[in-house]
Structure formats: C-alpha cells, structure tokens
C-alpha cells in the first residue's frame, strides 16, 4: 500500500502539515510487512484487526475535525461512522468490539482509499483559515491518538501472527531493545514530599494533568527491569503452582487459564522458545521479560520478597534509571488526579470513563512511536492482560 502524498511545505500553523503526514505515514509503514489476509484477523476481543485500526484513526479526524470545522466537507461514507466508532457514546451506535473481525467489508482497499480521501481533505484544511488556535489542541490529540494506535497495531499484529501455528515473522531484522549494561542495584529515596503530574509545555493527556504533592515513605527501586533469566527461575521454582504469591483473582486466573509462563513462551524439545516480532526464537535470558500480566508481575515480586512500585514512586525515581523498553506495571489503581474534570462532549470520553478496575503502567515500550513517551504518561490496563509489551521493575 502506498503512503499518502500530502504536501509538506512550511505553513503558519506550526508545520502541522508535515507532522500530520509523518505520523499518518508511519501507520501505513507499520502495516507494510503484512499480507492482505493479516489485515482482517481478530483472535480475541482485545485485539482489533489492522484494517480496523487504519479506519478508526481516519474516522477520528473526519468526525472530530473535518465534519464540524471544515465547511463543505462531504463524508466519505456515512456508514463508516457505525463501523469505525470505538467507544464514543456521544457519537452514536457502533459495531460491538467483538465483531470487528467479522467484517470483510469495507475491504482493505476501501480503507486505504478512505485514508487517502481524508488525508487529502486534512491537507486542505491544514492550509486553510479554518485551522484556528483553538483547534490545534484537538489536532494534537488526534495525532497522539494515532500514535497510540500505532503501538496497538504492533501489539495486535504480534498477537495475530504469534497465535498462528506457523509462527510467521513480522520482520526478519531484530527490533528489540536490550537491557542496559551494568549490574542491577536498588536506588534509595528518602521519605518526604514530592510532586507528580505533567507540567511545562507540550502535549499531554488529560489524565496527566493536576500536578500535585504526594508524601512518600522511604523506598528503593531497582535500576533494571526483571530479565527472562530471573523470571525463568520463578517458573522453575514452581511460581505458577504456589498460590501464596498470588492475589486471589490472580490465582483464579492461573487455574482457569492453566497459566505456566508469559504470553508467547513455548516449551519445545526441552527448551523455552519465545515468539517475537522477528519470529520464534530461543529465549534471550538477558532480555527484559515481556508480555506479563499484573497478576504475574505482582506474584513474581512477592516471590522475590519485594513489591511493585507505586506510580508516584516510579515517576519520582524515573530520572535515575533507564526506561522505555517495557510498559512497567505499578501497584497503583488508575484513578483521577486531584482536580481532574472530563472535557465536555465526546472528547471527554477519552480517558475519564475508564478510571475503574484498571492498574497504571508507566514508561514506554519498544512498540511506542518516537516522540510519544514522557515520564508522566499514565497507561492503564486490566490486571489479567498480557498482550501489551509489559514488564516488571521491583521496589521495596
């Protein structure tokens, strides 16, 4: 599939044209190695077909920017509102999440035509007088929304290919990031009052706002992520067979799902293999363990006689260790910061309504697009999920 051909010349609107083109093109590049059949697969509810991601991110720009703000804009296909709306109740009815992979139409070709149409109209919009300063924040949100889906594209593509018994590689070249060199050590912090939350200039999501003071007891946090070698020791010591290390719900998850290892680990011919985006490979013992649920992360920490850090501890300490290889589970529930208020309208559904029954993850991962990470970023997932590029950093 070809990239869109947006103009990239300088303009008075902070060079939005180039930024828009670069980010939109990157989504297409991610899908470059796929076969046409890969675009429509949905193995589980949490995984969306790549075709849907490409359509949904396009729908976002059409629905929230072009339709209400670009006079004369004609919707590409009115039925796409039902197909590509994700969870915006304000916008109306939609295909239920479990059915995204049941739709053979619109075709992959149709979705790329949709992207090209909207991209061309966005190019015209970004050069027009209709792009006001008040709309720039919404445009920035749309671009960061697309970057979130770029990471989701990679996680979902990995799940789709990784659950194919042929274990096809997404790419042949190695795209993983190794652990830092050097020994692992515990970094100490004194008790006291600290501040967390976004401040300064640049973009952030609304769930990062509300910088506030927090009191922390004395704590220590590990300079390195937990490695495959360390996690293998947990497995070989019977970690998945000893209920004492698990939350009650976590132990139920283990027994009901017959969990014995991280997602993508396979014991074949007497050795542990790991499905990666580069295909099935023998486990690299020095690499940071990946695709871990909160239940597993918490159980491992208990087995080691330690714990997971809180998100406040993680943010406070983040300047003292390297991060960005794995989304790191914290022991903090996903809750609003002091003073948090949902925005009016559909945009207000972006984060606030998910602040229940989820845990916060901090950092970034090998799948996070360049320029889309910061130490105040609050990711969040349910406790049983493994399909994201998640890992473990210990605290005590």
Image: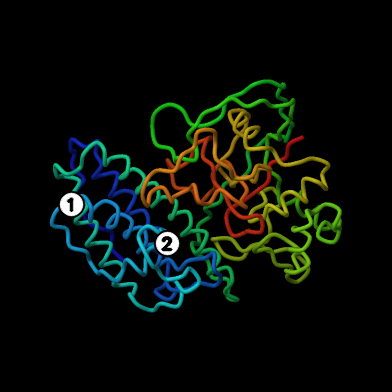
Q: Which residue occupies the foreground of this view, 157 or 211?
A: 211
Q: Is residue 235 left or right of residue 146?
A: right
Task: Tell me residue 203's x, y (percent).
Answer: 39, 36
Q: Is residue 77 left or right of residue 280?
A: left
Q: Is residue 87 above or below residue 185?
A: below
Element type where label 1 sits in the image: loop
Quadrant of the image for the N terminus?
Answer: bottom left
Contact, CB < 8 Å: mark 2 with mark 1?
no
Task: Tell me residue 325's x, y (percent).
Answer: 57, 45
Judge the density around disc 1: few (<14), some (14-19), many (≥20) Cα neighbours within 10 Å: some
In the drawing, what numbered circle is on residue 86? 2
- Spatial distance from mark 2 to mark 1, Cα to Cα? 23 Å
In the drawing, what numbered circle is on residue 70? 1
In the drawing, what numbered circle is on residue 25? none
Element type where label 2 sits in the image: loop
Residue 74 image-quadrant placement:
bottom left
Task: Tell me residue 66's x, y (percent).
Answer: 23, 54
Residue at image coords 13%, 57%: 72
Quadrant of the image for the C terminus?
Answer: top right
Judge the density around disc 2: few (<14), some (14-19), many (≥20) Cα neighbours within 10 Å: many
Q: Is residue 317 left or right of residue 246?
A: left
Residue at image coords 67%, 25%: 215
Choose the circle earlier in sequence order: 2 or 1: 1
Residue at image coords 73%, 36%: 395
């Amino acid at each position: 599939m070809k990239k869109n051909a947006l103009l990239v010349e300088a303009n008075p609107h902070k060079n939005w044209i180039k930024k828009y083109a670069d980010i939109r093109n990157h989504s297409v590049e991610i899908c470059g190695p796929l076969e046409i059949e890969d675009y429509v697969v949905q193995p589980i509810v949490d995984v969306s077909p790549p075709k849907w991601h490409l359509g949904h991110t396009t729908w976002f720009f059409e629905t929230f920017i072009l339709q209400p703000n670009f006079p004369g804009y004609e919707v590409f296909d009115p039925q796409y509102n039902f197909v590509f709306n994700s969870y915006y109740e304000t916008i109306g009815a939609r295909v239920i999440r479990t059915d995204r992979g049941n739709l053979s139409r619109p075709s992959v070709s149709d979705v790329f035509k949709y992207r090209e149409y909207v991209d061309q109209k966005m190019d015209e919009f970004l050069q027009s007088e209709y792009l006001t300063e008040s709309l720039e924040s919404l445009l920035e949100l749309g671009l960061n929304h697309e970057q979130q889906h770029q990471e989701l594209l990679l996680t979902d593509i990995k799940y789709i290919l990784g659950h194919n018994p042929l274990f096809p590689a997404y790419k042949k070249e190695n795209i993983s990031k190794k652990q830092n060199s050097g020994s692992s050590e515990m970094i100490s912090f004194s008790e006291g009052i600290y501040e967390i939350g976004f401040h300064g200039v640049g973009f952030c999501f609304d769930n990062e706002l509300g910088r506030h003071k927090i009191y922390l007891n004395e704590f220590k946090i590990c300079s390195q992520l937990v490695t495959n070698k360390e996690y293998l020791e947990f497995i070989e010591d019977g970690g998945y067979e000893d209920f004492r290390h698990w939350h009650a719900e976590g132990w139920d998850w283990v027994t009901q799902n017959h969990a014995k290892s991280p997602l993508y680990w396979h014991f074949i011919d007497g050795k542990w293999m790991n499905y990666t985006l580069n295909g099935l490979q023998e486990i690299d013992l020095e690499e940071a363990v990946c695709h871990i649920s909160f239940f597993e992360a918490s159980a491992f920490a208990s087995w080691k006689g330690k714990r997971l850090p809180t998100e406040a501890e993680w943010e406070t300490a983040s300047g003292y260790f390297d991060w960005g290889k794995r989304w790191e589970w914290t022991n903090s529930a996903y809750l609003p910061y002091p003073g948090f208020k949902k925005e009016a309208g559909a945009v207000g559904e972006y984060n606030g309504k998910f602040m229940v029954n989820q845990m916060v993850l901090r950092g970034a991962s090998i799948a996070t697009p360049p320029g889309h990470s910061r130490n105040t970023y609050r990711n969040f997932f349910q406790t049983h999920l493994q399909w994201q590029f998640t890992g473990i950093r210990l605290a005590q």
